[in-house]
Amino acid sequence: MSRLMVDLTPLKVSRDFRLLFGGQLVSMLGTSLTVVALPYQTYVLSHHNNVVVGLVSALGLPVLIAGALLGGAVGDRVDRRTILMRGSTLLALASAGLGLNALLTHPSLFALIVLSVIAAGVGGFTNPARNAAIPQLVAPDQLVAAYSINQIVIQVGAVVGPAISGLLLAGAGVSACYFIDAATFIFLVLLTIRLRPLPASGSGTSTSLLRSIGAGFSYLRTHRLAQCVYLVDLNAMIFGMPRALFPAMALSVYHGGTMTLGWLNAAPGIGALLGAMTTGWVSGVTRRGRMIVLSVMTWGAGIALFGLSPWAVVGCAALALAGYADVISAVLRNTILQSTITDDYRSRLSSIQIAVVTGGPRLGDLESGVVAGGFGAVTSVVSGGLLATIGAAALAVWRPEFWREQPTQN
């Protein structure tokens, strides 16, 4: 059993990692409330227009990517603790603004869009510093365990947050989700203050920020495995991420309410949490690229099954299967990146990874919303899942070195 369960050593031996873990866990719970509340409120304010829901998410994408790339370059120059504190403070203010807007008699869709775009940019700027800080908090031989624990944090938020959001939306209203999110960011700031300083590596300080960002992309062009890691994730998220259609599936296909919506949002996280808690076996995978491809194909099949099912229970089970496969892919993708990228480019490649991981789902929101606007929500979900599966198989054929990738023997 010890080889199956995740290794908790980083939490036992590192006080600062425990602080980061605790703050991020609470913050992720709050963020998950907003992840559900924002598309739901957009769906209602736009009079049930799926295209608008997708567009609102996609509008934040350029700002998110720009913020992530800039944050990656700044993360090599500025104390990462400072970045985390200031970024979390701004995110708290943005969530509070969404809450105040929701309390209005006639909430403004424009204000919702502006605040969500600001939050996307700040979040993109902050996340590379958080990812790059982890190697400063734990020993090198604990990195895989630390990133597995990080996945548990993300998935706990993905499970518990949507479940709570269903209750809040049905009772206290959408504003409560935003205000709780703001409070969790304040809690994160208070714990981050207690961290020891996390000085930058100093890499790239002799050049301008733009040149430093460009150097990161130049390095990526020579790193074929990193390219495959990003491409396989983009394929899965752009075609196989139907979260923008969860309101339509919950209300129009399953004929449920906000509780059904909450369960749809929580289901992938339930499967992913189970996967994250049982990642002890991942270190024994000898063909990591192959397992990633197979995991993404399983993700796509689960999404397609979700779209085909007329029953909410079966649909949630399919989403849980997809979530389980996705977290295995995520842990292995992080393992490949952390073990093959040189330290000089870790922060900048982390920023590109953040842009991919957070930007891909936003493109998926746009893709699924546009297809649903023309052909219906069910067709959009099913076709997206099938395309994600086909795309993963095509990548394995196009880049056979990724299919054959395995750990370097020391």
Image (cartoon, grey):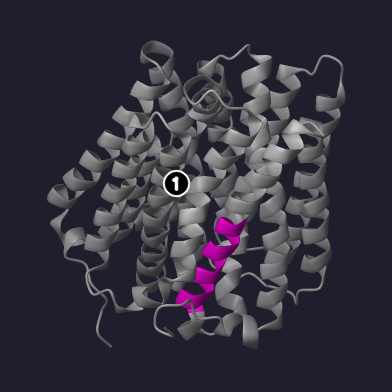
Quickly name the residue at label 1.
Answer: 356
Left or right of 158 in this view: 396:
left
Q: Residue 395 at x, y = what percent?
A: 20, 47
Identify whether 314 is placed above or below 283. Answer: above
Comparing 198 with 367, the one in front is: 367
Secondary structure predominantly adopted by residues drawn in magenta: helix
Return the residue nearer the eye: 134 or 289: 289
**Residue numbers of the magenta segment:** 143-156
Up-down relation of residue 298 to residue 117 (above or below): below
Q: Quadrant of the C terminus?
A: bottom left
Q: Does the stretch in magenta take in 386?
A: no
Could you tell me the amino acid type at mark 1?
Val
Which residue is found at the position 35% from the left and 73% from the top? 282
The image quadrant of residue 74 is bottom right
Can residue 65 be seen here? The reply is yes
Looking at the image, which is closer to me, 155 or 233? 155
Residue 8 in the image, given as x and y percentages of width and height: 56, 81
- Answer whether residue 152 is magenta in the image: yes
Q: Secondary structure at mark 1?
A: helix
